[in-house]
Image (tube, helix red, strand yellow):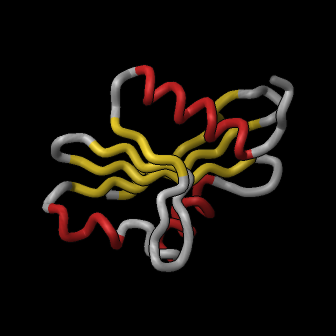
Amino acid sequence: LDNKTEKHYQTIFYIFFKLMGQFVQAEPRSAVGRADAVVTLSDTVYIFEFKLAERDTAEAALKQIDDRCYAMPYAASGKRVVKVGAEFSSETRTLGKWKVKK
């Protein structure tokens, strides 16, 4: 449990949403890459990209979602697409900062 990688936080996030009964995908493919997680609700799709604060920022995570077109597979779904960049701190082992873009 003392893992200080982005994958560690991705796994916790995945388990959290799965236990809540949500449809969550870890690393679903797009044409240019893989988002860290996608949570699909009846009217909204949330696209998450995670970064470690010691290496990167929530803003960089949002930029990656846009640069790699992670939202493209959901554009024709008719659902609202929300992009979330999350920054985790391996020092405090918490979510430090997040940015949302609709």
Q: Nearer the viewer, residue 73 or 44?
A: 73
Residue 90 against residue 38 in the figure, above or below = above
Name the side, left or right, on which 58 lies relative to 16: right
Residue furthest to the left in view is 78
Tell me, yes or no, if residue 99 can be seen here.
Answer: no
Name the residue rendered at 44%, 67% in the picture. 70
Q: Residue 101 appears in which quarter of the rendering? A: bottom left
Residue 8 image offset from top left, x and y in percent: 72, 37
Tell me, yes or no, if residue 73 can be seen here.
Answer: yes
Residue 42 image offset from top left, x and y in percent: 17, 42
Residue 72 against residue 102 in the figure, above or below = below
Name the side, left or right, on which 24 lies relative to 86: left
Name the residue rendered at 56%, 71% in the picture. 33
Q: Where's the C terminus, which quadrant? A: bottom left
Residue 100 image offset from top left, x and y in percent: 42, 51
Name the side, left or right, on which 96 lies relative to 30: right
